[in-house]
Image: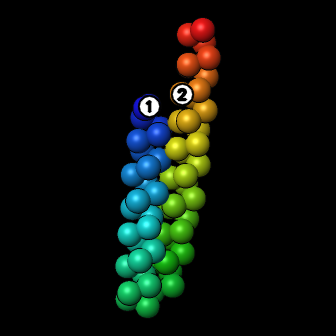
Amino acid sequence: MNKDQIKGTLKDAAGKLQQKTGEVTGDPVQQAKGVQKQVAGKTQKAVGDIKHMAQGAGKR
């Protein structure tokens, strides 16, 4: 695992928590921010996955 994969996973989890908090408190702004954070986290993890695969392919 590389740092993009780790940071992306953590950002996704934080976004899920923020979205749920917004749902519980009835705050649509927090819900939207949580969803945005999840998308950013998933994107960052995908970048990390690609980097990881590229490093593995370079070792062959």
Q: Amino acid at mark 2?
A: His
Q: CA distance from mark 2 to mark 1?
A: 7 Å
Give the answer, above or below, for where 55 lies relative to 26: above
Nearer-the-camera pick, 15 or 58: 58
State the image coordinates of residue 18 (x, y, percent, origin top left): 40, 71
The 10 Å Cα crowd at callout 2, few under 14, some 14 to 19, many 20 or more, is some
**Model colouring:** rainbow
Q: Quadrant of the N terminus?
A: top left
Residue under the point 55% across and 52% down: 42
Q: Is residue 15 left or right of residue 60?
A: left
Q: Secondary structure at mark 1?
A: loop
User: In which quarter of the view is residue 60 placed?
Assistant: top right
Q: Residue furthest front?
A: 60
State the image coordinates of residue 39 (x, y, percent, origin top left): 57, 59
Give the answer, above or below, for where 15 lies relative to 30: above
Q: Secondary structure at mark 2?
A: helix
Give the answer, above or below, for where 51 lies relative to 31: above
State the image coordinates of residue 7 (x, y, percent, origin top left): 42, 44
Lower sequence index among marks 2 and 1: 1
Q: Which residue is mark 1?
A: 2
Q: Amino acid at mark 1?
A: Asn
Residue under the point 52% across and 44% down: 45
Q: Which residue is mark 2?
A: 52
Circle 2/circle 1 CB separation < 8 Å: yes
Residue under the point 39% across and 61% down: 14
